Image (cartoon, rainbow, N blue to C red):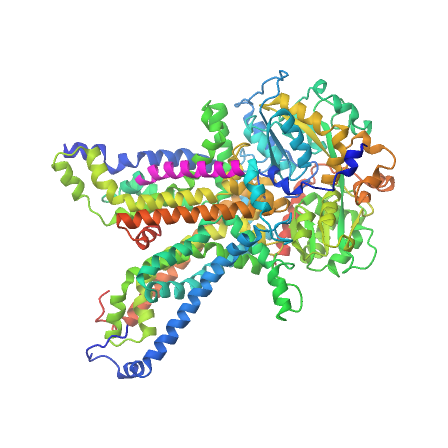
Amino acid sequence: MSADVSRNADAPPAPRTRRSYGGQKRTRLRNTLFAVWGAIVFLFLFTPIAVIVTYSFNSGRVLARWSGFGFGAYVNAVNNDVIISSVVTSLQAAVGAALLSTILGTLGGIALSRVRGGGWWAAALTGVLVFTLVTPEIVDGIAFLPWFVTLGVDAGLTPFSNGLVRLIVSHAMFSMAIVTFIVRARMAGIDTSLEEAAGDLGASPWRAFRDITLPIAAPGVLAGALMSFTLSLDNTILSSFVQQPGYTPWPVYIFASVRVALRPEVAAMSTIMLLLTLFALAVVGYVLRRSGSSSTEIIKTMAG
Amino acid sequence: MSERMRVLAPRPALAQYASYGGGLGGRFSRRGMLAGAGALGMGLLAGCQSSGSVASSPAADGRIESKLNVYSWGDYDDPDVLDAWSAAHDVKLQVDAYGSNEELIAKLAAARGTSGYDIVVPTGLRVPDMAEHGLIQKLDMSLIPNLDTIDPNFRGQDYDPNDEYSVCKAWGTTGFVYDTSAVPRELTSWQDFIDVAQDEANGTTMLLEDPWEVVAIALAALGHDLNTIDEGELDEAADIVVEQLAPTARAYLGNANTAMAQGGFVLMQAFNGDARQGIMEADDPDRWKFVFPTPSANIWTDNWCLATGAPNPDAAHSFINHVIAPDNAFAQVDYIGYHTGSSVLAEPGIEDDFDFADIVFPTQEVLDRLVPSEFNSGQARRVEIFTDAQARSGT
Amino acid sequence: MKRLAAKVLGPGALAFPTWAYVVFFFVIPVSMVLFYSFGYKPDEYTTVATDRLSFDRYGEVFNGAVLSTLLASLRISIVGTLLCLAISVPFTYWLATKVRPERRGLLLALVMVPFWTNFLVRTLGWQIILSPDGFLSDWMQGLGMLGEPLDILYTRSAVQIGVVYNYLPLMILPLFVAMDTAGTRLREASYDLGAGRISTFFRVTMPLAMPGVISGCVLVFIPLTGDYITASVLGGASGTMIGQIIASQFNTAQNWALGAAMAVSLMLVTLLVAAVAGLLLWAGRALFHRLTRVQLEGVPS
């Protein structure tokens, strides 16, 4: 790091002297301090998760009151139809919402990155999407339920009376803006000449889109889809308003249990889901590594 | 009482309770404003009924459907009783939880018959409104023969004089629990509650997350009618709630049971059944004491009702008939800690079969001084007082 | 052909489905709620009436109890955002410059793990940790660090810890990206030109990381201000946040007009704070550039 460098006329001599004198030691100390800080942050990030994992082995009835070690909570959780079906509902809704919001967000993101000279619609769309991000979730919830009923009962569009459809539509709304912005960021630096070249070479617009534009956007699309999936899986407030019996998603189930008294089953199921998530992430990472993208690259794209 | 029921462990299958959770979260008081504002429901209905229709439900045809969706207060039935029924009829039973009558009514009204719920459990004084606005429909009592086993005292009540819409589910009252190791005195009144809250329990008091109940503490201590709509009286109560209670409150929770599991509370406003659950689950039950405070408190009744648009009416009737059966009354009361109104509970000596029976069965003297809460024009002011109290606690 | 392609797949047409979806599932239903904020609650049985429109509900919001809760929430979210930033800057600097490149991906993925665990479950973990009867309290008392049970749960401090925890990954990610993009070469150039470490950090690394700082702050601040789950699990009476009061207007008080007015006010105040912060930042940067331009003339920027 402290590379030996050629003299610079402007350089004040003092710092240089200081660095060469005992610089090694200082650097090591500094690096140690940074590493300690990193370790503290990781400790902070993982303590509550470790607690949940630990307490999932609580054999007692109340999660927070440790009474002994046991696997009872896992047995109960796996055999509990309602827990299983809420997890399945959550996964279905998350996949559906991720698909829907990714399709719409990708189209929107590409369109926004392609606009030249700032069309009014682009500014307006960006504005509305930003608005969806800053709207408190509770407002979305209270707005959605009557709207779904109007569509489902009054307008006779029966799909909107289905709990899963409601979850997917509302979650997709919630994460669409994020996908759009990620894809737009991904496409921002890329000019349209490639597509135009493809057009000149006789490719149909669809082929140009499929063979040129989509591959370029792919990392952004993937990141957006992952983000959307995560947000849907985590969504509590919106879901609690639009959910229907038979389609109770997992976070809503947990939130309802918080009110009464939490049982270790919730921790057990969360631990199982955490392990599955880690496994899925490892698979994704492996696939990406094989396809040549570094995970840093993906996460960078995700963060916009 | 059969031998079998006596043998029942207090709550062997509590661990399974979680299977019956679900539903909207949010920590509202378990009982809600008793007469809870049907406001949302009514508003929506008023606005929508002209333009929108309410989805209708299929008629009962004698065949029990394969599903049943119940929307009730959290952890309000013995899982064994529910399992027995769903196993016997091979029905997939889903029980979701709500935290206040308003939440229930909001959900039903907004969904206009598409909520998917078959059975709901509103508090008595909401029943007429809900019936009038088409949120619940008449039960077919011929399918619920066990109605005859309900104590006549809990049938034909004012809110449903002809037993058309509701079947008594449970009733209870409000009081408080305190830690006798921190407060070694005998507490008896709401004034004691306020005093202790500012003294030994300063910063360790729990209030119910329910405007009516919180304001009722002050009204009772002042000796006013708990359902008063007099602005002067409510202002006096506001002063006590905001200036004396709010600064000492550590949390507003829906359920004293949760608070006791959490630890850190000395004084908790509580419904009797929740308090009993919390005491029974505590490491040292003797430390805690439940009080039916003088001069007065709320008495409420929850009811089994059939939601409009219920997709599974046959299963619903069969379920209600099963749950209120005399054979299940003991298990239900022992689990939830609330009297279910079953006539078998009127048998002399029944108290001996329960732990902490004195909390489940208030004496006649206590019963005589209780009043049912009402939903009236003072409600907006109560909500305002409650909001002020919450803000005051935060400063 | 080319023109046709441009027409068919023109940006406007491409964005149409997105537009339609946003209008149909956001603009229409949410506008209805916004409209309610100008209405009133006529009686106990009605949630909202809009036959007489006024700004009175906004008057109620910016008056007394609600305002104090709103300000308390803002304090929590501003402090929370700054804490997240303070924790993340050294952390991401370490991650981007000190950690070996091949390990960075793994460590970043680890940062994401809490993010992949349910929000509520994470918060419940804190509830267990901070409980006065919990293990941390027992340990600290056992070690003599505390004379009495831990007194954090159901206080504002608990909410503060909870929100910092819940939103920290949202700060770390963009900040890391920015730090990483800044690259080591420019820093080395700065050293070569004789700048010290501290001055390099403030004059080279931080300015280059600024976009990450900004997007991190926005990502943390906006959802944090409207959060109500963290506060309802950890907050108790003294940690109440505005989100809870808004929710109770819809769920308990059944006053849609006031609830909608509160929600709109929250959005406006959130945007206002963000705008003021942006303005300050812009002014600060302009000033900083003025002050430092001369000394770092040799560094490409």
Task: Please give the name of the residue rendered at 36% of the width and 65% of the height, measured from the top-left corner.
Answer: C93
- In the image, taking residue B206 as reference, residue A280 lies left or right, namely left
The span shown in magenta is A84-106
Q: Is residue C20 found inside the magenta-colored segment of the image? A: no
Task: Please give the name of the residue rendered at 19% of the width and 43% of the height, measured from the top-left corner.
Answer: A192
| Along the line of sight, the residue nearer the viewer: C276 or A109 | A109
Residue A203: tell me if it is visible: yes
- Quadrant assignment, res A32: bottom left
* Numbered-mark total: 0
Screen quadrant of the N terminus of chain B:
top right
Q: Is residue A87 found inside the magenta-colored segment of the image? A: yes
Compared with A203, C111 (above or below) is: below
Main structural element of the magenta stretch: helix, strand or loop?
A: helix
- The outermost residue toward the front is A70
Q: Could you say where residue B218 lies in the image, as x and y percent from the top left?
A: 75, 49
- The outermost residue toward the top is B61
Q: Could you say where residue A292 lies in the image, as x and y percent from the top left?
A: 26, 50
Q: Could you say where residue A214 lies in the image, as x and y percent from the top left?
A: 25, 40
- Quadrant assignment, res A25: bottom left
Q: Could you say where residue C141 lies in the image, as x and y percent from the top left?
A: 64, 67
- In the image, taking residue A161 as reference, residue A190 lies left or right, namely left
Screen quadrant of the C terminus of chain B:
bottom right
- In the image, taking residue A31 as reference, residue B149 lies left or right, namely right
Task: Please give the name of the residue rendered at 27% of the width and 41% of the height, measured from the top-left corner.
Answer: A110
Residue B300: tell me if it is visible: no
